[in-house]
Amino acid sequence: MLQISPPPFRLILIIQTKFIGDVVLASTLARNLQLEFPDARIVFLCEAHFKSFVVAHGIASEVVTFRRSRMRGTPLERGKELYAVVRALRDFRFDLTIDLTDSKTSRIVSGLVNAKTRVGYNPPERPLKLLERQPANLFAKPFGFGGQHFVYRYLSPLEALGVDLRVTMPSIEPLPFETDKALALLGEHHLDPNGFMAVHAGASFKGRQWQPERFAEAIDQIATDTGLGVVLVGGPDERETAGRILARTATPVVDLVGTLSLESLLAVLKQARLFLGNESGPMHMAAAVGTPVVGLFGLTDPSRWGPVGVPSIALRPPMPCDCVAKGLCRWPDPSRVCCVWRLEVKPVVEAARELLSRTEVKRERAG
């Protein structure tokens, strides 16, 4: 059977307006496109906070940004932000757009950019509303190449385009000068590379955060058993959670919450022996640099959103959930429920021990 090669696209837009974990997973799509079309310019549309990370690590050659706060503001603010974004994108004259976000707003953007080839999903993640238009003229499956993890949703446009799949898992190396900074920072706190556990206790919604007191108990048990140091990481809005953990741990903990850029965080995670944390962007970042991961999940299915490409254990309480936060949960949205609160400390500690044992020889060879 004659196989037709995809046309040589020169200017490609990837619309990925979600969170840093989605950007990490979508980097696999960008890498495959770079390999297939080495002369193409790949542009990301993403949240402004991610611009330097995306460009510095070669995920895209250029970035057009939007401000999430404006897109969630008044109708006037949303209109102004959308107008500015579309105007900036139209100046590029793209010949291919790939809408990974698959939302009402992203579809509006894709339609207004009006590239010759516009890839969307069929069916979309949420059904189109009565007056909503689907601007795509080339459709990707919900999950491509026979995969079920969300990374294969972001890879599915390749299948629609007829592009061979060469890279299946995110792999992002820290910048050399960020590695130097990370090593110096660890040295200041008397921590050796591969001699500490990175812990991320935050998440985008309170219900997705395992309880700080349980994190504290798990940290103490794992540190006592293994002799590993402990580093807390997270964003500036997660300082309160970090404070609650620090107040309850007997183990000395290095608190880096709110102090690291995404580029610096990636470099610190690369040096960790183990990552322990909620389902979140830092979990996917840790996996992308090759650090073993213990991930804590609630209603979200780890087979769809778990860490990929590294040794890992994803923990999730038995389902269906016996609700522990009826006044807070917004069922059935997995990002708005508190099922992870049902995880006990013992299985988390056991998972960390098991993963450390399983990866001991490999990490020694790597070192």
Image (cartoon, rainbow, N blue to C red):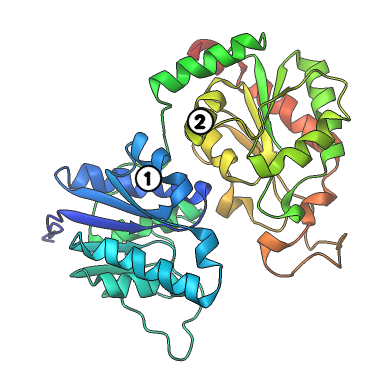
- As helix, strand or loop, the secondary structure at mark 2 comes to helix
From the image, state whether disc 1 or disc 2 is nearer to you: 2
Q: Which of the pair 227/113 is nearer the observer? A: 113
The answer to whether residue 290 of the structure is visible from this angle is: no
Residue 274 falls in image quadrant: top right
Percent of width and height locating residue 83: 36, 70
What's the residue at 58%, 15% (across, down)? Answer: 185
Crowdedness near tag 2: few (<14), some (14–19) or many (≥20) residues, C-alpha within 10 Å:
many
Left or right: 111 as drawn, with respect to 361 = left
222 relative to 142 in the view: left or right: right
Q: Position of residue 175 (x, y in %)?
A: 40, 25
Of callouts 1 and 2, the N-terminal one: 1
From the viewer's perspective, is 238 left or right of 310?
right
Does residue 163 appear in this view? yes
Query: From the viewer's perspective, is residue 283 above or below residue 92?
Result: above
In this picture, residue 90 sits left or right of residue 354: left
* Residue corresponding to mark 1: 28
When the figure is inspected, residue 291 is found, relative to residue 87, above or below; the finding is: above
Percent across and percent down for residue 54 are 38, 42
Q: Nearer the viewer, residue 145 or 128?
A: 128
Element type at marker 1?
helix
Residue pictured at 77% horizontal, 59% vertical: 319
Amino acid type assigned to the residue bearing label 2 in the image: Leu
* Residue occupying the point 63% across, 10% down: 188
Q: Which residue is mark 2?
A: 266
Q: Amino acid at mark 1?
A: Thr
